[in-house]
Image (tube, grey):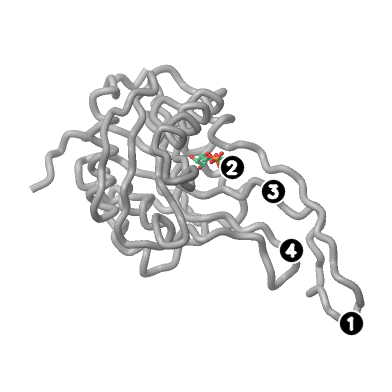
Amino acid sequence: LAPRDLEGLRIAISAGGTREPIDPVRYLGNRSSGRQGVALAAEAAARGAEVTLVAANVAGDVLAPAQHPSVRIRHVGTAAELGQAMAEAAASADAIVMAAAVADYRPVEVSPRKLTKEAGGIPAIELAENEDIVAGLVRARRDGQLIVGFAAETPGTEGDQEELLARARRKQQRKGVDLLVVNEVGWERGFEAVENAVIVLAPDGAVAATASGSKREVAAGILDVLRPLWTGSRG
Ligand code: C5P
């Protein structure tokens, strides 16, 4: 039986990958399935937390494990929608986990009609930068609120772990998150896969834990690091 060690914790979790429309049928997206964020929601709920899961383009079968009376699911498509939903959820959350893969850029103009080859030439898609959602959540942080970011990183040359960790620590600093979950990704690893392996960086940048196995096991490892940092105050 799962311990109820997160009873009373209100946690907002984002999962999946945003899609930035180009025209009515095309988008800029990424390969995030949402499985790790869904596993976090399921594990947190099983341990007694009240969860808001902001799901960006997560398929129904992937979302199934998060069906739990303590999980409220909000569906979003774009980065802007995800940012809005997370800001709302964050207003009454003790902890925030940004597991979603957010598009860094969006097309400046969304064509109201499907782009067609008949127009001739190769279309140029002008991009604008999306806001860094987690950095915004850090700026709006409530007292005692814990904020967890993810970093999907491809390894450096020769799979250099130290280089990867140094890059991750810079990201942790830049974003101002408390914990950073470092996820090594590649063509076969991390995204879409059933299994995962992560390194969790503590607020001071030290390695707090490593976790691997099913995404549910990885979720448990991440929440084990978060749990003692939560003061339990609802201030
Ligand atoms: O910089 P990078 O995209 O690797 O950072 C990943 C972390 O930042 C994740 O937690 C992701 O959800 C978050 N992020 C965000 N807004 C963006 C891009 C990433 O909140 N526009």
Q: Earlier in the sequence, mark 3 or mark 2?
A: 2
| Above or below, comparing residue 218 to residue 25 in the picture | above
The x, y position of residue 72, in whole percent, is 38, 50
- 1 and 2 marks in contact (CB < 8 Å): no
Q: Earlier in the sequence, mark 3 or mark 4?
A: 4
Q: Provide the residue designation for mark 3.
A: 105
The Cα atoms of the two marked residues, 3 and 1, are separated by 27 Å
Amino acid type at mark 3: Tyr
The Cα atoms of the two marked residues, 3 and 4, are separated by 12 Å
Quarter of the image with the C terminus is top left
Viewer-nearest of discs 3 and 2: 3
Q: Earlier in the sequence, mark 1 or mark 4?
A: 4
The Cα atoms of the two marked residues, 3 and 2, are separated by 17 Å
Amino acid type at mark 4: Ile
The Cα atoms of the two marked residues, 1 and 4, are separated by 17 Å
- Within 8 Å of ligand 1, the CB of disc 4? no
Residue 22 got which mark? 4
Q: Residues within 10 Å of mark 3 (few under 14, many from 20)?
A: some
Ligand 1 location (quadrant): top right
Q: Provide the residue designation for mark 1.
A: 118
| Above or below, comparing residue 226 to residue 144 in the picture | below
Q: Earlier in the sequence, mark 3 or mark 1?
A: 3
Residue 224's quadrant in the figure? Answer: top left
| Above or below, comparing residue 25 to residue 208 in the picture | below
**Helix, strand or loop status at disc 3:** strand
What residue sits 44% from the left and 40% below the top? Answer: 150
**Helix, strand or loop status at disc 4:** strand
Q: Residues within 10 Å of mark 4 (few under 14, many from 20)?
A: many
**Helix, strand or loop status at disc 2:** helix
Amino acid type at mark 2: Gln
Amino acid type at mark 1: Glu
Please tell me which residue lies in front, 198 or 165: 165
